[in-house]
Amino acid sequence: MPNKTIISWATFTVNVVHGCSKPAAVPLEHLGLAEIIAGGEIDPKWTKPNTSPECARCYAETLSNKRGWTPQPWLEQHEAENVQLHPERIREFAKVPVKPAHLPPSQRERFFVCSMGDIFHRLVPDDFLEEVLLAMAASPHIYQVLTKRPDRAADFWFPGTRDGRWPENVWLGTSCGHPVTKWRIEFLRNSYAQTRFVSMEPMLASMLPLNLDGIHQVIVGGESGSGFRALQMPWVREVRDLCACGTPVRHGTHQQRINTVGLVYTQCVPCMTRPPLPASDEVRALERA
């Protein structure tokens, strides 16, 4: 059986990929798009590897290195040693009985896929990704796929489909807890996923201005552990108020209050219209502007 989890927005975790490397906050090829979204120039330091601010105190890295699951710090120069594929874990999806699809997400099994890695890391082959996605389609639980590399995810067609669209039960999300990484939301919005969410956990600054068109759920929360970077509640309220028009928001970890606090899990309904295909052309047009 897969591992039960204490993560508030999931019921199971399955790490078909374990280990990662910390990406650049803004890959050089997306600097133009990021500056359009930011409304000004971005410091070149953010284009260097290992600068993604959400990754600075990665819980998965700390735990993996402490327990010997990965041998090196999660830096780009060690990615070949740390990124591990576990094809034997793909069958874990089918070991959990599938609940009726008409139930709200809060009453269904929700798999956080790769809580200890990034399935869209460049060292994960396309054929392995396709095998994982097909297993998700065969056992239709809710799958929450969270990545810091939505540029790769945005181009990824769901295997066996005519138009590339992902099933509604396979949710694609991206981590964005700092203004410099808001470019990731643009790729997510233009992906083939029908259900899209943003994780602002850890939330490191005010995220306004923020465009959530085409985003179906937002998770906000602070950092945990000793030396955590403090979450300011006004930042949370800004996103809550922005989501009042219909995007569900969930409050995750808040270190200052010790436990998970905030809003009740809201059913995530993919009610917004996906931008026209192909997604990659739209994003690249923005970059060229």
Image: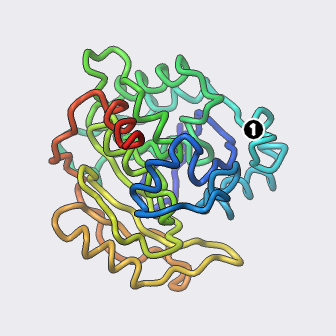
Where 61 sits versus 263, above or below?
above
Q: Which residue is at a point 69% across and 45% down the rendered structure image?
A: 21
Q: Amino acid at mark 1?
A: Glu
Horizontal side, residue 179 vs residue 226: left or right = left
Where 275 sits versus 115, above or below?
above
Q: Which residue is at a point 16% across and 42% down the rendered structure image?
A: 273
* Nearer-the-camera pick, 218 or 252: 218
Q: In this orientation, does residue 129 appear? A: yes
Q: Which residue is at a point 45% across and 35% down the rendered structure image?
A: 153
Tally the marks: 1
Element assignment for label 1: helix
Determine the image quadrant of residue 134: top left
Name of the residue lying farthest toward the front: 289
Determine the image quadrant of residue 245: bottom left
Q: Which percent across, then down, holds residue 83?
A: 71, 35
Q: Which residue is at a point 41% across and 79% down the rendered structure image?
A: 235
Determine the image quadrant of residue 63: bottom right
* Nearer-the-camera pick, 173 or 46: 46
Q: Which residue is mark 1?
A: 79
Q: Which percent across, then down, holds residue 100?
A: 22, 38
